[in-house]
């Protein structure tokens, strides 16, 4: 009998206890490498976004010949004033041949995992091979996942931290201070000086300049993951003008990414192009590279299929009767009628 595996937050916590946060980031990174490597197998489109003056709600679909996935995700910076998270999400994975939903899953945690995995994959492809230090600008809900991914999968040894809210930095140090070398700073200038990688991950939906052109040194790699909707940026435009810029899906990035205010023909390279031919990546150790990441449905696809496989393998989650299974598939009305009482 078909069923839909359901992974709620308690089930996701149990799954993370089995596979580990780093193990999940590594597994999703491997799926991302495989899926971006077969780029032309996917039907792709920019996400659908509904904006208000308080935030945005988005749907992110993608499919290949076998599976379809989507994510529902919001971005509401003022949610923290109500004790709610800025970003919350859920998603589904279905089989294409029947349309049957195989998985319904929370994706707030999964989004953090797949974002870290995508950041790591991009850095593996285009950052310098000898990177050992990273500035983490924005120490909110995504920061631990980013630091763990870069430390364990890319070999980053030292993280320099800055956030407008010192409590966010304190939280990051409290969570990971015993595992990773974390160094707090009182200014962005101090945090980014001399590092190999700068990761920006801020929440405010505005045209901000978090990192100025004067802060960026030759050879740096910028992992810009906070600018993810129209009207939101983190980098001074001049940085892009002297960098090689990499994106997930150019039609979406030109609407939502750091490049949204550049010319329509501003040159960018999609990640799949680097996987297809490494010569499309970094051209020298002195070159500045920018991963202008906005989040793309293919990343959710990679994450959902990882979670589905792990949930089945470890027997975690419950099976939902989400879709009707009928004795007579034409008699949906009959399914709604009361079951006759036994005599």
Image (cartoon, rainbow, N blue to C red):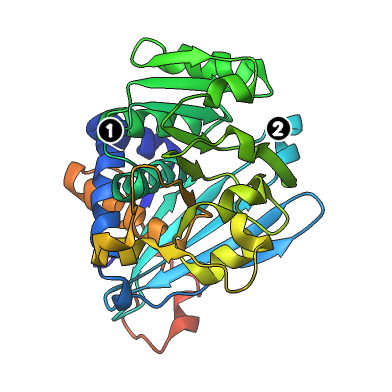
Q: Is residue 325 above or below residue 92?
A: below
| Residue ranking furthest to the left | 313
Kind of element beneath mark 2: helix
For the residue pair 56 and 266, the one nearer the viewer reads as 266
**Residue 273: numbered disc:** none
Q: Which of marks 1 and 2 is nearer the N terminus?
A: 2
For the residue pair 2 and 48, the one nearer the viewer reads as 48
For the residue pair 44 and 122, the one nearer the viewer reads as 122
State the residue position of label 2.
Answer: 80
Q: In this view, does 27 lie above or below 174?
A: below
| Residue 262 placement, left or right of 281 | right
| Residue 280 placement, left or right of 223 | left
Count of marks, rendered view: 2
* x and y percentages locating residue 225 in the rendered image: 53, 45
| Residue 152 placement, left or right of 71 | left
Distance between mark 1 and mark 2 Cα atoms: 38 Å
Q: On the rendered image, what quadrant is the C terminus found in?
A: bottom left
* x and y percentages locating residue 209 in the rendered image: 70, 41
* x and y percentages locating residue 279 in the rendered image: 27, 61
State the residue position of label 1.
Answer: 130
- Name the residue rendered at 40%, 89% in the picture: 330
Kind of element beneath mark 1: loop
Q: On the rendered image, what quadrant is the N terminus found in?
A: bottom left
- Name the residue rendered at 26%, 70% in the picture: 38
For the residue pair 145 and 234, the one nearer the viewer reads as 234
Mark 1 and mark 2 residues within 8 Å of each other at the beta carbon? no
| Residue 278 placement, left or right of 181 | left
């Amino acid at each position: 009998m078909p069923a839909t595996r359901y992974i709620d937050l308690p089930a996701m916590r149990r799954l993370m206890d089995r596979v580990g946060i780093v193990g999940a980031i590594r597994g999703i990174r491997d799926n991302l490498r495989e899926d971006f490597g077969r780029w032309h197998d996917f039907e792709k489109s920019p996400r659908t976004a509904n904006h208000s003056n308080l935030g945005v709600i988005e749907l992110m679909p993608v499919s290949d010949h076998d599976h379809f996935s989507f994510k529902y995700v919001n971005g509401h910076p003022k949610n923290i004033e109500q004790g709610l998270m800025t970003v919350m999400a859920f998603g589904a994975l279905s089989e294409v041949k029947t349309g049957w939903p195989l998985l319904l899953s929370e994706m707030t945690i999964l989004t953090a995992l797949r974002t870290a995995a995508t950041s790591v994959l991009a850095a593996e492809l285009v950052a310098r091979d000898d990177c050992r230090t990273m500035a983490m600008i924005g120490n909110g809900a995504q920061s631990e996942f980013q630091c763990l991914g870069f430390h364990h999968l890319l070999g980053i040894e030292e993280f320099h931290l800055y956030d407008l809210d010192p409590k966010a930095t304190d939280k990051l140090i409290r969570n990971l201070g015993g595992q990773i070398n974390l160094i707090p700073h009182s200014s962005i200038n101090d945090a980014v000086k001399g590092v190999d990688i700068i990761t920006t991950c801020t929440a405010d939906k505005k045209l901000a300049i978090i990192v100025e052109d004067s802060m960026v040194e030759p050879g740096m790699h910028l992992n810009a993951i906070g600018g993810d909707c129209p009207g939101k940026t983190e980098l001074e435009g001049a940085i892009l003008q002297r960098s090689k810029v990499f994106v997930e899906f150019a039609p979406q990035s030109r609407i939502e990414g750091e490049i949204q205010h550049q010319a329509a023909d501003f040159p960018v390279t999609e990640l799949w192009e680097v996987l297809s031919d490494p010569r499309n990546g970094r051209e020298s150790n002195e070159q500045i590279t920018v991963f202008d990441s906005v989040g793309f449905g293919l990343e959710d696809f990679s994450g959902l299929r990882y979670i589905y496989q792990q949930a089945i393998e470890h027997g975690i989650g419950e099976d939902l009767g989400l879709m009707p299974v009928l004795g007579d598939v034409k008699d949906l009305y009959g399914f709604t009628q009361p079951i006759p009482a036994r005599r």
